[in-house]
Amino acid sequence: MIKKTVTVQLRNGLQARPAALFVQEASQFSSHLTLEKDGRIVNVKSIMGVMGVAPAFGDHFILSADGPDENEAIAVLSGLVEKAE
């Protein structure tokens, strides 16, 4: 299992379209992926879960991956959120 603290650099955070793209990308990995923010843990492959915690610009959350492609999943997903628009 790998965990990484991620800071949201997307101007609009993980809202609507960015959240959908994030979930779509996460669905490509076979690892179990979770996002933890403010004590809530959600499945990264669930659009309702991600939008339910609604990480905004500047927020920090913990991205966790457990599975055969966990390293790649963490790298790709954290890269999507940490890149400046």
Image: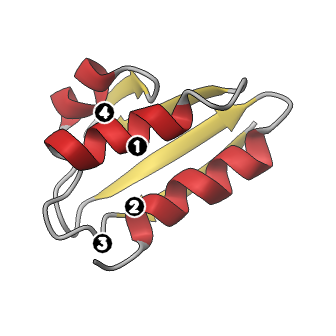
Looking at the image, do the residues carrying marks 2 and 1 touch, with CB atoms under 8 Å apart?
A: yes
| Residue 46 screen position, x and y as percent | 37, 20
Marks 2 and 3, how far apart at CA: 6 Å
Q: Is residue 37 visible?
A: no
Residue visible at 59% across and 39% down? 64
Is 73 rendered above or below residue 6?
Answer: above
Which structural element holds mark 2?
helix
Is 20 rendered above or below residue 81?
Answer: above
Residue visible at 30% across and 72% down? 9
Is 53 rendered above or below residue 47?
Answer: below
Q: Which residue is mark 4?
A: 39
Q: Identify the mark nearer the N-term, 2 or 3.
A: 3
- Number of the label disc, if any, that sits on residue 81: 2
**Mark 2 burial class by Cα count in 10 Å: few <14, some 14-19, many 20+:** many
Q: Identify the mark nearer the N-term, 2 or 1.
A: 1
Q: Looking at numbered disc 4 in the image, what kind of residue is underneath it?
A: Gly
Q: Which residue is mark 3?
A: 9
Looking at the image, do the residues carrying marks 4 and 3 touch, with CB atoms under 8 Å apart?
A: no
Image quarter of residue 85: bottom left
Is 29 rendered above or below residue 11?
Answer: above
| Residue 15 screen position, x and y as percent | 16, 45
Looking at the image, the residue that sits furthest to the bottom is 84
Question: Which of 58 and 14 lies nearest the eye of the viewer?
Answer: 14
Q: Quadrant of the N terminus?
A: top right
Q: Which residue is mark 1?
A: 22
Colouring convention used in this rendered image of the protein: secondary structure
Looking at the image, do the residues carrying marks 4 and 2 touch, with CB atoms under 8 Å apart?
A: no
Answer left or right for 45 relative to 11: right
Which structural element holds mark 4?
loop
| Residue 5 screen position, x and y as percent | 49, 59
Looking at the image, do the residues carrying marks 2 and 3 touch, with CB atoms under 8 Å apart?
A: yes
